[in-house]
Image (cartoon, rainbow, N blue to C red):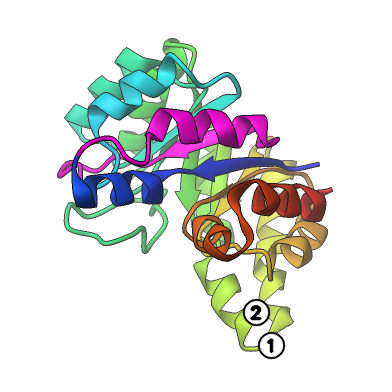
Amino acid sequence: MAKLSVNINKIATLRNSRGGNVPNLLKVATDIENFGAEGITIHPRPDERHIRYQDARDLKKTVTTEYNIEGNPIKSFIDLVLEVKPTQVTLVPDAINAITSNAGWDTINHQAFLKEVIAEFQKNGIRTSIFIDTDLKLIEAAAKTGTDRIELYTEHFASEFEKGNKGAIKSYTDAAVLAHQLGLGINAGHDLSLDNIQFFKENIPNLAEVSIGHALIAESLYLGLENVVSMYLHRLK
């Protein structure tokens, strides 16, 4: 069964929109774990428009499942991760002003940089993952960085699935097969939802973890957070 890690950025966005501490980010994270999720994901950005760096520190004290911190490995992010020491760090090549993640790493041109950063995190006992597209040459290059896992960037799959094009899954299946052959663990995330998660899981061999935030929180407005977490877990079995 692939693990479900819930991205709680949107909870922080809601809190920040009003000031104060409602909703309480730490309590929501604990509730999500109690509802059965196997991980908590956050993606702090330099402007702290949703998750703040202090949130990352505070969550370390309360998260009892896997703790995944995503982000672009600029110096302030690297320093934060080395201080907090989460279970996993997922490296994402975000532009500073990006609304959301919109591309995976070019693991060929950035290989030397990724090797250096990954080695530092691993030296500190932090599992590493690289956010990546399905280009097989990039998968091969990712393996050469020394990373433990990749995270498949699934926006294209989700968009095509919504249009009825289930054939878009093939490149993801091929990428997962190659990654496994190269000794990499396989994560996935971006625009996965209750509508597409079961089909995705059934077609991605050796899927270890999915990170889901925006859709899960949006679905919870209608169906309730506990119910939605349970529905994802059921589809991932």
At x 55%, y 54%, the residue is: 189
Against 66, residue 182 (above or below) is below
Residue 159 falls left or right of residue 122: right
Residue 221 falls left or right of residue 193: left
Q: Which residue is mark 2?
A: 161
At x 44%, y 43%, the residue is: 8
Query: Can the viewer see residue 15 in this picture?
Result: yes
Question: Whole-percent x and y of residue 141?
Answer: 50, 46
Q: Which residues are magenta?
A: 20-48
At x 69%, y 69%, the residue is: 196
Against 27, residue 44 (above or below) is below
Quadrant location, the N terminus: top right
Query: Can the viewer see residue 145 in this picture?
Result: no
Q: Are marks 2 and 1 in contact (CB under 8 Å)?
A: yes
Question: Whole-percent x and y of residue 220?
Answer: 56, 58
Residue 114: within the magenta?
no
Against 124, residue 163 (above or below) is below
Residue 164: mark in rendering: 1
Binning the other alpha carbons within 10 Å of mark 1 as few (below 14), some (14 to 19) or many (20 upward) gives few
